[in-house]
Image (cartoon, rainbow, N blue to C red):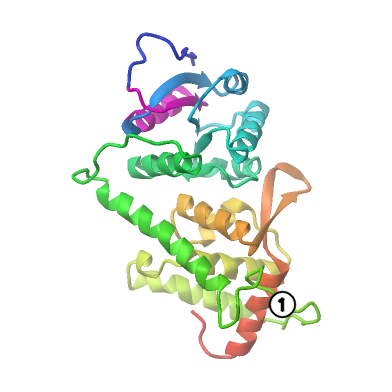
């Protein structure tokens, strides 16, 4: 795949914020180009994944970096992701990483700051939304097209509602009758976590999944709760849960699950743990306080149906 300089005469898309694109294949590059052009941004360079890190380091100014991954780029991909993750966390530029479901684990293993917008098999609306959200974090204006009559308008509104729902859920977790504690699940250190029967948790998970046989699944979408149940089940059985598996347990699109995962980690509800045997994978666990709270919840509910 060829790299194109930012000052080529054939790159005349707009005067919008410059975006550097890196991709693992020509089809991946084409998808990224369409997304960036649709956002009204200017393409500063189109790069092969192996050349991207040095080019980004040389770039004097870029509003955003878009990385499109559809094949495993190995060490060069890992190095690029780690570098971009650090830069995005430092506020040097905004960053979006688009990935296929098969590559969630090796990609997420290199993104630890939570500063990057990660999307999986995303549609046009999700791509536009991801770039807008990423650039908003560093105060970069974007010239987005009018979506009022666009066929993706409904999807964009759904994405906005989804972000609002995450914020509202976390607000409820962080508040209560008393002033909000520093940690949403502050449990006295002397408290013993009640035992929860494995079959109880499995029955709840099974009951939640059965609803989709009779109603549309998105009517009951609650990824935070579904992920918490899956992690509790894994904790009881002493099984590790990689990010890709947790996304499946969330029962929502992978991009939505990853957005929830990032938020739950930032709130201290979930914790990431490196895989000691595979440097390109991380596991997710319940934070100790969250585990205590969830077990106490089950103990208080008792034999009542918890769905």
Residue 180 rendering spot, x and y as whole percentages: 60, 73
Residue with the mark numbered 1: 187
Quick one: 99 or 264, which is closer to the camera? Answer: 264
Residue 150 rendering spot, x and y as whole percentages: 22, 43
Residue ranking furthest to the bottom? 303
Which residues lie in the magenta part?
14-37
Residue ranking furthest to the left? 149
Residue drawn at x 37%, y 28% is: 41
Residue ranking furthest to the right? 190
Q: Answer whether residue 22 is magenta in the image.
A: yes
Residue drawn at x 33%, y 44% is: 125
- Secondary structure of the residue carrying tag 1 is loop
Q: Is residue 222 above or below residue 97?
A: below
Whether residue 237 can be seen here: no
Q: Is residue 68 above or below residue 206?
A: above
- Left or right: 52 in relation to 285: left
- Left or right: 198 in relation to 276: left
Residue 284 rendering spot, x and y as whole percentages: 66, 57
Whether residue 231 can be seen here: yes
- Left or right: 221 in relation to 13: right
Quick one: 165 or 273, which is closer to the camera? Answer: 165
Q: Answer whether residue 51 is magenta in the image.
A: no
- Left or right: 148 in relation to 162: left
Residue drawn at x 74%, y 43% is: 278
């Amino acid at each position: 795949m060829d790299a194109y300089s930012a000052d080529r005469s054939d790159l005349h898309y707009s005067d919008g914020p410059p975006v550097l694109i890196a991709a693992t294949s020509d089809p991946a590059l084409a998808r990224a180009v369409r997304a960036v052009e649709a956002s009204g941004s200017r393409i500063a360079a189109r790069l092969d994944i192996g050349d991207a890190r040095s080019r980004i380091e040389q770039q004097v100014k870029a509003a955003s970096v878009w990385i499109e991954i559809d094949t495993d780029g190995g060490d060069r991909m890992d190095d690029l992701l780690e570098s971009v993750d650090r830069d995005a966390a430092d506020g040097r530029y905004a960053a979006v990483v688009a990935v296929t479901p098969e590559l969630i684990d090796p990609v997420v293993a290199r993104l630890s700051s939570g500063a990057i917008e990660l999307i999986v098999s995303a549609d046009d609306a999700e791509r536009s939304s991801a770039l807008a959200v990423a650039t908003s974090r560093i105060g970069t204006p974007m010239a987005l097209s009018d979506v009022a009559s666009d066929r993706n308008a409904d999807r964009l509104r759904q994405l906005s509602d989804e972000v609002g729902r995450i914020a509202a859920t976390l607000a409820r977790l962080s508040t209560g009758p008393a002033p909000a504690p520093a940690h949403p699940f502050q449990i006295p250190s002397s408290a013993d976590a009640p035992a929860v029967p494995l079959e109880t948790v499995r029955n709840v998970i099974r009951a939640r999944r059965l609803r989709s046989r009779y109603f549309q699944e998105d009517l009951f979408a609650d990824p935070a709760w579904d992920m918490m149940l899956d992690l509790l089940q894994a904790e009881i059985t002493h099984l590790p849960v990689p990010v890709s598996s947790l996304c499946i347990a969330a029962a929502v699109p992978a991009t939505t699950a990853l957005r929830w995962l990032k938020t739950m980690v930032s709130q201290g509800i979930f914790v990431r743990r490196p895989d000691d045997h595979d440097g390109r994978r991380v596991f997710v666990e319940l934070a100790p306080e969250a585990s205590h709270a969830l077990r106490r919840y089950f103990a208080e509910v008792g034999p009542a149906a918890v769905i």
